[in-house]
Image (cartoon, coloured by chain):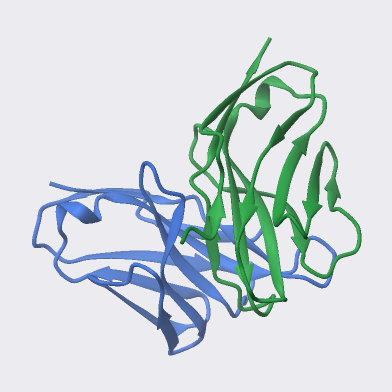
Amino acid sequence: DAGITQSPRHKVTETGTPVTLRCHQTENHRYMYWYRQDPGHGLRLIHYSYGVKDTDKGEVSDGYSVSRSKTEDFLLTLESATSSQTSVYFCAISASLAGGWAYEQYFGPGTRLTVT
Amino acid sequence: AQKITQTQPGMFVQEKEAVTLDCTYDTSDPSYGLFWYKQPSSGEMIFLIYQGSYDQQNATEGRYSLNFQKARKSANLVISASQLGDSAMYFCAMREGPSNTGKLIFGQGTTLQVKP
């Protein structure tokens, strides 16, 4: 168990409103990621973090910002939500839990966001 | 150019039979990793198996094995003795560069249905 939770799990919001999604982990993992999943696509990387206050952009970062002020929390903010941001959002951590030397990625349960 | 290709949108398999899900990838980085994830209808992303580019042997994890053909740039997932609970969407993903910082690139997924 990678100890990842996401909140809220479901949210409906209106176009133009700000939205913040939270990813919380309990195992002190350094690397954290935000992905979005849309029909017809696999998951696509939005932003990622290599540590506290150390973040960078992914493939689909436009319209999103992130913050990481504590190791355990990685926040994703939609400053002004649009209908194109209706999606399922997954947080992930990078950890070596399978017993080998390599790092795998483990995902949180996801947040379903609907922008009306 | 698409870096991860899953050419089978949907597949059927009879319970207790083996099934192969195809994945091809494209990278010029000598250091990379290949992942398979399962996404049941409940929506969570479940890590199944990992293969590193320098690993000499094909990865195995219980009923899952990864048929890694480096020269052909393929990383097919083999599920032996299929069970009804294997019905799900399966995603192949690739990480380029260092293991611990890995950002994943996903294929579009294959839906597997196991028939009783």
Residue B18 position in % (x across, y down): 79, 26
- Give the residue drawn at x 79%, y 53%: B68
Tell me if residue B12 comes above or below residue A12 in the rendering. Answer: above
State whether residue A46 is above or below residue B90: below
Q: Name the residue furthest top.
A: B116
Q: Is the C terminus of chain B in the top left, top right, bottom left or bottom right quadrant?
A: top right
Pinpoint residue A111: horizontal percent, then vertical percent: 38, 51
Locate residue B29: give its quadrant: bottom right
Q: Nearer the viewer, residue A42 or B69?
A: B69
Q: Is residue B102 left or right of residue B83?
A: left
Q: Drawn colour of chain A?
A: blue
Quick one: which residue is furthest to the bottom in this view? A53
Q: Which chain is green?
A: B
Query: Up-down: is B16 above or below A85?
Result: above
Q: Is residue A23 left or right of residue B31?
A: left
**Can you give x and y, in whole percent of width and height, for residue A74 in the image?**
43, 73
The residue that appears at 67% across and 29% down in the rendered structure is B86
Residue at position x 84%, y 64% from top?
A99
List x then y, in percent, for residue B108. 48, 46
Q: Nearer the viewer, residue B64 or B11?
A: B11
**Residue A70, above or below B71:** below
- Report the label total: 0
* Residue drawn at x 41%, y 48% as measured from the top left: A41
Which is more toward the observer, A6 or B9?
A: B9
Residue located farthest toward the right when viewing the structure as drawn = B57
Q: Residue furthest front?
A: B71
